[in-house]
Image (cartoon, rainbow, N blue to C red):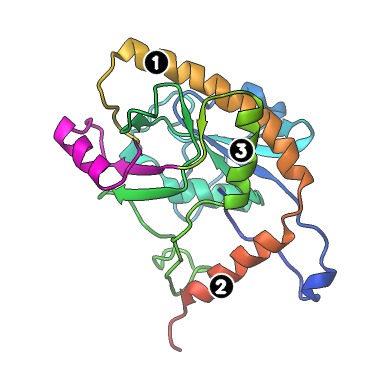
Amino acid sequence: MEAGEASFSDAPFSAKMAAAVKIGIIGGTGLDDPDILEGRTEKYVDTPYGKPSDALILGKIKNVDCVLLARHGRHHTIMPSNVNYRANIWALKQENCSHVLVTTACGSLREEIQPGDLVMIDQFIDRTTKRHYTLYDGQCSTLSGVCHIPMAEPFCTKTREVLTEIAKKLELQCHSKGTVITIEGPRFSSRAESLMFRSWGADVINMTTVPEVSVDKVLKTLKENANKATSILLTAIPQIASMEWTDTLHILKTTVQCSVMLPKH
């Protein structure tokens, strides 16, 4: 998924240089190990929305600039409802990340999605209740107005295709699309709730798995999938960096600009 807006001059669009690629990586459960980066440095930052989950780890993957951020903190101390999502995204934007690649541990709601499978999600259903939904809340003076951002296609198709292609080349069991439902937690969903979510069209869920499995198996699967995700990132990031993203980033920038309703003065 891409995040942020590229910084463009006032020159004609056709004359602009190719957009620089810098990859933000938000590591979820099992994938927050800074060892995937070379030449690591730590950077503690603040944002208009408070501090992000942890220090930003700056480094390179095969000569591509990357920024790693552990969503739950490096010691996994932050519960899902308490993650400062807005600060995390703002911090990566502040570091000029053109893309954000995100991993998350999910449970399956479909028999055909087995423990250990990878899913390149293309849609979500939001069932959270305690989290801030927007950066445009008047708290940040540089983000005035109200942003009604389109969300029909919430994840970048171009980036997902790259990741799916790499997963197949690595011979990993991967589903090229899927709908994730995100629940508040920290409790797991009941079986009745999971069956209801499945009837809604959800394929995976962020806080549970059906049928239930033992904690030992969950931890084993998390470790295995973290290794798989790392393999994909190490291969995909250089490929993403070699591609042309100027048009894609320009479209996203324009979409955001056209989605903001500024206050009347």
Viewer-nearest residue: 132 or 175: 175
- Which stretch is magenta? 178-204
Mark in the foreground, 1 or 2: 1
Task: Residue 247 in the image: state x and y as whole percent.
Answer: 71, 63
Mark in the foreground, 3 or 2: 3
* Residue 95 to residue 174: above or below: below
Q: CA distance from mark 3 to mark 1?
A: 24 Å
Task: Residue 11 in the image: state x and y as whole percent.
Answer: 81, 75
Task: Residue 83 in the image: state x and y as whole percent.
Answer: 39, 40
Q: Secondary structure at mark 2?
A: helix
Which badge, 3 or 1, is on the more N-terminal residue? 3
The residue beneath circle 3 is 163
Residue at 73% in and 33% down: 60
Please give the label number shown on residue 219: 1
Q: Secondary structure at mark 1?
A: helix
Task: Residue 20 in the image: state x and y as whole percent.
Answer: 76, 52
**Is residue 200 at least partly visible in the picture?**
yes
Which badge, 1 or 2, is on the more N-terminal residue? 1
